[in-house]
Amino acid sequence: MKAPRTLVVLLALASVSACGIIKPSEDRILFDGKAFKAKAKAVDKKASPTDFTVVVKGASASLDGAREAGRHEGTKFCVQNFGSSRIDWKVGPDTEPQNLRISDDQLTFAGKCQRP
């Protein structure tokens, strides 16, 4: 009788510990009703640390949503790294659709964080 109880306890502990690994879908920010994977990174940390790009995957799901996901990711990057949400976009969320950089279903923005 002891073995099944121990097994149940171990399985319960494993399932509780796994909760921190998987991000619940309720915690994701949706843009135009969709979740996008977006990543911002510095172009060259040494030469010009404030210049960055944002890549948003799955842009065909909703161009408007992908634009807002890119704006959010760029703003988050600048706030975390430079303490300001001000961005000078070279190609960004307000760029005319025909001038956007879209390739392989990925939208790419380029901008420069403005220091406070």
Image (cartoon, rainbow, N blue to C red):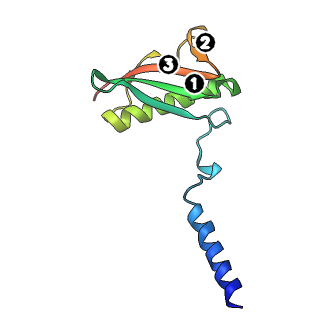
Residue 4 higher or lower than 49, as above or below: below
- Left or right: where 1 falls relative to 52: right
Residue 63 higher or lower than 27, as above or below: above
- Left or right: where 109 falls relative to 65: left
- On-image quarter of the N terminus: bottom right
The numbered mark, 1 or 3, whose residue comes first in the sequence reads: 1
Q: Position of residue 91 (x, y in %)?
A: 48, 15
Disc 2 residue crowd, few under 14, some 14–19, many 20+, Cα 10 Å: few
The Cα atoms of the two marked residues, 3 and 2, are separated by 10 Å
The residue lying at 68 percent from left, 26 percent from top is 62
The Cα atoms of the two marked residues, 1 and 2, are separated by 10 Å
Location of mark 3 (residue): 92
Q: What kind of residue is marked 2?
A: Pro
Q: What kind of residue is marked 1?
A: Arg
Disc 1 residue crowd, few under 14, some 14–19, many 20+, Cα 10 Å: many
Q: Can you name the residue that lies furthest to the top here?
A: 98
Assess whether mark 2 and mark 1 are in contact (beta carbons under 8 angstroms): no
Q: Position of residue 97 (x, y in %)?
A: 60, 12
Location of mark 2 (residue): 97
Location of mark 1 (residue): 67
Residue 22 higher or lower than 89, as above or below: below
Q: Secondary structure at mark 3?
A: loop
As drawn, the label of residue 77 is none
> Of 39 and 10, which appears nearest the observer?
10
> Of 106 and 72, which appears nearest the observer?
106
Q: Secondary structure at mark 1?
A: helix
